[in-house]
Amino acid sequence: MTRVLVAMSGGVDSSVAAALLVEAGYDVIGVAMRLWNGPSDSGCCSLDDFVDARRVAARLGIPFFVMDFSDLFERHVVRPFAEDYLRGRTPNPCARCNQFVKFDALFSRAQALGADFLATGHYARLVRGPEGEWHLHTARSRDKDQSYFLFGLPRQRLAQILFPVGDRTKQEVRALAREKKLPVAEKPESQEVCFVPRRDYAEFVEKYTGQAGAPGPIVDENGAVLGVHDGIHRFTIGQRRGLRVGGGRPRYVVDLDPNTGTVRVGDRTATLAQGLRAIQVNWLVSRLPEPGEQLTVKIRSRFNPTPVVVESADATTFVVRAPGRLQAVTPGQAAVLYDGDRVVGGGWIDAPI
């Protein structure tokens, strides 16, 4: 019998994923990942979540384990998260967790347990092409699609990954959970960043690093000082709220200088860029995009993909330009390239163009 290890968070998506695999006749093992030992109110990775996951596993009649990945999570996710904010960058911890923890360390544990596949409750699809190679595609439900966060998956392992709910809508998943009488059928969704209490990123960074944040000037396009801030870790490119620079026309953060602690603001047009450069790229296709090739790029999880033209691409970087401009290109965020609904690859934004 084919064995599958399922990452069970205690939420409805991963619970239904496990239930579907049991129904399909797989030998299923449920695993919850202990990732964070600090305080959190996100409704994720808590003791209650482990209890919920265990209850679901008992309902399905499958073995269940809790595995501790907290050291790895802190090294690859939490520490870079805090350091990026102090450097004036805006990190993406969910994508890093998928890349370095869930589909790396957990995959190794799955193999050690004799599992043939690793499954999660992500909303994404894996499609086999005519040449036999597997490709990552967007979920059927675009409003729940999580392919943006999965660009770091190792291409050579796509054939060993399962996304059982990727072809379903959230409403359908809830209905399945009720039909199968899973104890988490009505459980609300968790917040995005599981280790930041109250979604207060600035407070978390200060407490975690022991650095209160160095004050600095807020200046306009001409360098005129409009105000003083309490640390660049409190800002992100494109931000409008919380600038405290008086009335008048709306202003947006357009640049963060970690060397001088300067926050530069301007009007909305100043947040537009002609393109971007991405580094530490992970390609999910065998043929790299060629100069002049037309794709789309997504630079925030909630942004729509924007048409771009590839300027250059190599094993670890790519540069793209957007005829219609890109809004709020933010160093530290992920830039993910798509060919239709297929993920071509992605990397971390190094700089706007």
Image: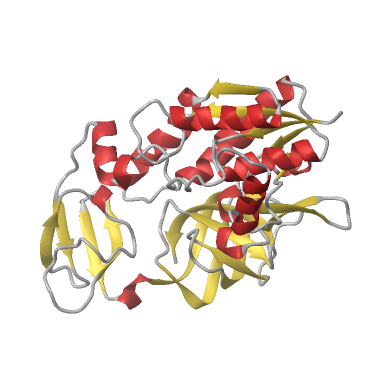
Q: Is residue 292 visible?
A: yes
**Coordinates of residue 32 in the picture (x, y in percent):** 57, 29
Q: Which residue is located at x 43 percent, y 51 percent? A: 332
Front residue of 332 and 55: 55
Against 331, residue 238 (above or below) is: below
**Coordinates of residue 186 in the picture (x, y in percent):** 52, 47
Q: Residue 242 appears in which quarter of the rendering?
A: bottom left
Q: Which residue is located at x 19 percent, y 70 percent? A: 220
Q: Residue 144 appears in which quarter of the rendering?
A: bottom right
Q: Which residue is located at x 66 percent, y 72 percent? A: 292
**Coordinates of residue 135 in the picture (x, y in percent):** 75, 53
Q: Which residue is located at x 57 percent, y 31 percent? A: 53
Q: Please state if 127 lies on the left or on the right of 13 as rendered.
A: right
Q: Please state if 282 lies on the left or on the right of 236 as rendered.
A: right
Against 129, residue 119 (above or below) is: above
User: How many numbered marks appear?
Assistant: 0
Against 135, residue 96 (above or below) is: above
Q: Is residue 160 visible?
A: no
**Coordinates of residue 225 in the picture (x, y in percent):** 11, 65
Quarter containing the C terminus: bottom left
Front residue of 70 and 66: 66
Q: Please state if 85 lies on the left or on the right of 220 as rendered.
A: right
